[in-house]
Amino acid sequence: MGNTIVKIDNLVKRYKELIALDHFSLEIEEGEIFGLLGPNGSGKTTTINCLLSLLAYDKGNIEIFGEKMTPVNYKVKKEIGIIMQNVAVFDELTVYENIDYFCGLYIKDKETRRKYVDEAIAFVGLEDFVKFYPKKLSGGLLRRLNIACGIAHKPKLIILDEPTVAVDPQSRNKILEGIQELNKQGATIIYTSHYMEEVEQICTRIAIMDKGKKIAEGTKDELKRMIKNTETLTIEILDLSDEMLEKIRALNHVYETDYSDSRLEVRFSGGKHNLIHVLNLLQENNVSFSRAYSELPTLNDVFLEITGKALRDKE
Amino acid sequence: MQVFKTFLKVLKKKLPNALIFIGVFMAIAIAMANSGAETAKYEDYEMKIGIIDRDNSKESKALSEFVLDGNKPVDIADDEDEILDAVYYERAGYILIIKEGFGEKLKNGDLNDLFENYKLPSSVYGTLFDNRLDSYLNSVGAYMSSGLEPTEAMSKAQEAMNVETKVTMKNFEDTGNDDYSENFSYYYKYLAYILISVLITALCPVLLIMNRKEIKARTICSSITASSQTFQIFLGSGGFVLIIWIFFAAAGYILTDGIMNQKVLLAMLNSFIFIIIAAGIAMLIAAFEPSSNVLNMIANVVGLGMSFLCGVFVPQDLLAEGVLTAGKFLPAYWYVKANNMLAGTCGEVFSKSEIFKCFGVEVLYAVALFAVVMLVMRVKRKEA
């Protein structure tokens, strides 16, 4: 860690009247799995496209490996691997031919390429499907092929733009494990998603985006510390009087309560044994309840508290 | 050359669509070439004729001599059953019985009821021979009325009947062009439709795949330069276009008995310019990124539409003035017009300067098409 691999400085991108990126800045260090989290339309893909010089931007500067990123900086491009949201493979070529084609755009030597292609196939577990055409592959296998095409040339920086959209849980886990493995092998990863669980699971540092702006950045713990909420209790209660709700609100560290559809939510800011305190109070007042559980804050809570809306509101 | 190799691999997968057009066209071209070889010929027909001479006079012998001149004699006995058998089994095509008193009647100037005949009722040759005999007798009568003796008149009449008129066969469809055959003209005319169809159905899908948004993005992000990508795709397209042209030019050469002269070379040059236009049309269509279903529809509309408007299927001189005016705005019109000039059909006359004028217009269309392709691609890139 330590070397800055990607530096985005004050980036502005407009689509006519719409500001897609609003003075967006970011620094990514070598060896990180950096998560770009935000709802659909928050500017994640635009950031990636600007980063890759697929899109021209109106203002700002992008540096990768210490060099200004331009459409003709092929030295930098050689070290980047991309895995797009939509599967980018040829239906007319077999699994092997597809990986060989994309690897061949970077690696000229045939022997080296053959070795790299075989390694990429083994990495994503497609050994039994090398002669298959993409149309014969399941959704999960197709995503794995998409990843293999992006990483076969062993890039130092791998950019994954929502690689798990519409993927079954088993394949999703396999993909996430693969990303962590690539990182262990030395690659720096930029991972965009609107699935907070994935980002929480694999990313070492996260930037949360909304409306083209970076609204928060840090490790997941740092992000969670930024907000008031430390714990949320959920208790199913058939009948709860206003008087009882007031008593709960009066407990220490409670800063918000919400009772609807026989479901009570109590949010705490600090404090210990909060669940026991609430349940004791309910028992003392002969209020019956069926189920109670406690949750630590998630990135969704971070996003909710900062923006006033949930990450998946727009889905 | 990774992009080039992949271009060829994808092309290989898309080629069967084009092979249908090529196969059908070549089948028709081969059939036409073979039917063209069977040129109508006319020659004298030698009919088997049996003569039964019941008169046995000088006059009847003179008649027999006339009748057998150019025909094959068949021996027939003077027996009705044998006569009927000979006709029925076609041992003889015509049997003439010269009646007794033929010579006397002729001397008296009586030309009626001189002989009888047997022939198959449906025989064309028999009927023709009846006419010939009538003409002969009329001539004999005419000569006798001018004072000649019957044998003398018969000799003169035979002499007159043997005068031949030289006949030259003329075909309405004949181009009158020994160095640019009719088959060659048709072959190159219909080639316009095939070139457009083949390039739209084979080249367009490959270009669409190579330029698919996701694949293009991945390729642009790679370390291969943009100019190298463009060059390799251009090389693949150009190579395919060249191979298709060489194939059709060679097939045309072989199917038309290997004729090679100035007009044939001009026809080949015409088709070469036109295949570049067809490639431009295919690239322009691909630039708009249509779906595969829409692409098939476009291939039919452009291919058939241009062919009908420009005189590929219907000769230009049979097209309505309005259709021709519209056709002039399409490159195929100038291609067909040049071809008509080479063949000397549709009222066109071979003129090198006029043909090169047509080529010039075609080249301008090609340049304009490629300029529009580049413009559309630039606009599309900006929109993306």
Image (spheres, coloured by chain):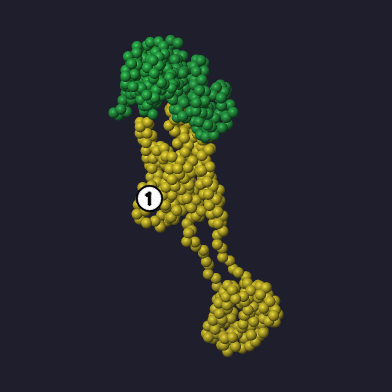
Chain colours: A green, B yellow
Residue B83, how many percent across, how many down? 68, 79
Q: Which residue is tagged 1? A: B327
Looking at the image, is A259 positioned above or below residue B246?
Answer: above
Spot the residue most to the left.
A17
The residue under the point 58% across, 72% down is: B124
The residue under the point 57% across, 85% down is: B111
Looking at the image, is A197 positioned above or below residue B360?
Answer: above
The residue under the point 55% across, 62% down is: B40
The residue under the point 37% across, 26% down is: A261
Residue A205, how many percent across, how many down? 42, 15
The three-letter code of the residue at mark 1 reads Gly
* Quarter of the view holding residue A262: top left
Residue B198, how many percent across, how many down? 48, 44
Query: Is residue A11 visible in this depiction of the protein?
Result: no
Element carrying mark 1: helix
Residue B15, how many percent across, how many down? 52, 40
Q: Using residue B246 as the reference point, say whether residue B118 is left or right of it.
A: right
Q: Using residue B218 as the reference point, say whether residue B132 is left or right of it.
A: right
- Quarter of the figure that contains the C terminus of chain B: top left
Query: Is residue B25 visible in this depiction of the protein?
Result: yes
Front residue of B342 and A213: A213
